[in-house]
């Protein structure tokens, strides 16, 4: 692990964002570890630092606008946009699907960077990419602070993460005994 990755993990631990226990992830899978990025987002100086560490990885990906899925990607996406000097918009849930609301627009051909906090299966990122395409925009990349997909997440654009940290995940009917013995919680992102 390099010093940048150690710094990222240190920030997650110090802010209480890396949890241990029995968690039900948004994907429906279960895990003994959870990245609760909302804990980091209480400390904007830490968010600023995480994005400073992420931006060099995005240097070859010019964009016109940054788009984030609500809720998890809001603070991180806004900070990415701020540091890049770009416009920031977000998509939010309506009837359990992400939609572009609040009179936000994506112009035809506008280059869009999709920003999320944590990706396990990539469902919300894919929904955001689909919205960009349906609006006529050009998605240039997707990025996240943490990729916990173990390399399984594939998008039609490059996927760039600050940290790749894959903890085992399990379907509800295939839990290891030590995880099944703990009460399951859904902490939210």
Image (tube, rainbow, N blue to C red):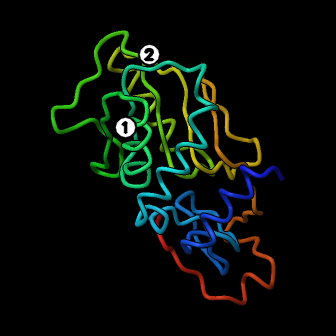
Which of the 4 image quadrants contains residue 141? top right
- 85, above or below 49, in the image: above
Tell me the residue at 37%/54% (across/down).
71
Depth check, front residue: 80 or 110: 80
Q: Position of residue 151 (x, y in %)?
A: 76, 41
Q: What residue sits right under mark 2 in the picture?
A: 138
Q: For the residue carrying disc 2, how many other residues have a C-alpha within 10 Å: few (<14), some (14-19), or many (20+)?
A: many
In the orientation shown, which residue stands out farthest toward the top? 109
Residue 54 picture quarter = top right
Residue ID at (49%, 45%): 116
Q: Position of residue 183 (x, y in %)?
A: 61, 88
Q: CA distance from mark 1 to mark 2?
A: 20 Å
Name the residue furthest right: 1
Would you say the residues marked 1 and 2 are in contact, meaning their CB atoms lie under 8 Å apart?
no
Report whether 96 appears left or right of 153.
left
Q: Quadrant of residue 23?
A: bottom right
Residue at 43% in and 64% down: 43
Foreground residue, 88 or 135? 88
Which class describes the residues within 10 Å of circle 1: few (<14), some (14-19), or many (20+)?
some
Please name whichever residue, 65 or 151, is drawn nearer the observer in this view of the structure: 65
Quickly name the residue at label 1: 82
Say whether disc 1 or disc 2 marks the residue closer to the N-terminus: 1
Residue 59 image position (x, y, % from top left): 58, 24
Residue that appears at 53% across and 66% down? 36
SS at circle 2: strand
Where residue 162 appears, x then y in whole percent? 64, 44
Q: Secondary structure at mark 1?
A: helix
């Amino acid at each position: 692990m390099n010093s940048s990755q150690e710094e990222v993990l240190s920030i997650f631990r110090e802010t209480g964002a890396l949890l241990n226990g029995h968690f039900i992830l948004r994907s429906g899978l279960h895990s003994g570890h959870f990245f609760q990025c909302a804990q980091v987002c209480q400390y904007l100086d830490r968010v600023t630092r995480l994005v400073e560490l992420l931006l060099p990885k995005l240097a070859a990906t010019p964009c016109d606008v940054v788009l984030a899925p609500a809720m998890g990607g809001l603070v991180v996406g806004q900070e990415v946009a701020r540091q890049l000097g770009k416009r920031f918009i977000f998509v939010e849930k309506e009837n359990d699907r992400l939609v572009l609301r609040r009179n936000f627009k994506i112009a035809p051909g506008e280059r869009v960077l999709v920003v999320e906090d944590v990706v396990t299966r990539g469902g919300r990122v894919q929904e955001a990419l689909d919205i960009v395409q349906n609006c006529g925009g050009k998605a240039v990349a997707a990025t996240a602070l943490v990729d916990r997909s173990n390399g399984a997440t594939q998008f039609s654009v490059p996927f760039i993460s600050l940290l790749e940290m894959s903890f085992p995940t399990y379907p509800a009917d295939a839990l290891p005994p030590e995880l099944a013995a703990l009460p399951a919680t859904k902490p939210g992102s």
